[in-house]
Amino acid sequence: MSKILSTRVGRETEEELRSYMRAEKVDKATAMRKLLELGVQGWRREMAVRLLREGKATVWRAATVAGVPLWDFISLLDERKVILPIRGSDVIDDVRAAMKGKS
């Protein structure tokens, strides 16, 4: 179910919104909805990377938090040059979780 949200934005943000509307040829509501969705997706990816770096999540769990398939998340980590302190038990746990997800 959809919810109505309202917010105030600065002049620069409004100008960026209008630029997006022109570039994508969409109305204001569609533009705001799409940009908000993109922002939430980006936040989820950032949160997942942070949890992983802090050792609070395995790669599999972080991919779930990010809302992307495991291999896409691994590619994201590679693009960002994220170095992980991975324990053997983490790899085994992730492989088991991945196998459960495929059955």
Image: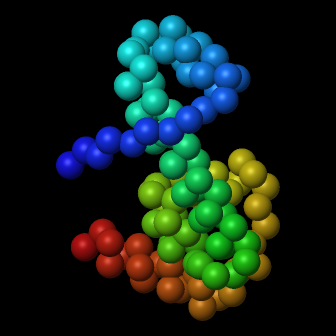
Where does the image place residue 42, in percent across and percent down from the top left? 58, 48
Q: Nearer the viewer, residue 43 or 14?
A: 14
Where does the image place residue 93, in percent across and percent down from the top left? 50, 86
Where does the image place residue 44, in percent across and percent down from the top left? 55, 57
Residue 44, above or below 27: below
Residue 65 falls left or right of residue 2:
right
Q: Residue at x 56, y 35 (%)?
A: 8
Image quadrant of residue 83?
A: bottom right
Q: Nearer the viewer, residue 102 or 50?
A: 50
Q: Residue at x 53, y 86 (%)?
A: 92
Residue 93, above or below 12: below
Q: Quadrant of the C terminus?
A: bottom left
Kindly tell me whether residue 71 is visible in this rendering.
no
Q: Residue at x 73, y 77 (%)?
A: 54
Image quadrant of residue 58?
A: bottom right
Task: Count numbered badges in the picture.
Answer: 0
Residue 10 falls left or right of residue 101:
right
Q: Nearer the viewer, residue 7 or 22?
A: 7
Where does the image place residue 33, in percent across and percent down from the top left? 41, 34
Q: Residue at x 38, y 25 (%)?
A: 29
Residue 83, above or below 87: above
Kindly tell me whether residue 48 is visible in this rendering.
yes
- Which colouring convention does the figure follow? rainbow
Residue 64, above or below 35: below
Residue 5 falls left or right of residue 13:
left
Farthest residue in the bottom direction? Answer: 89
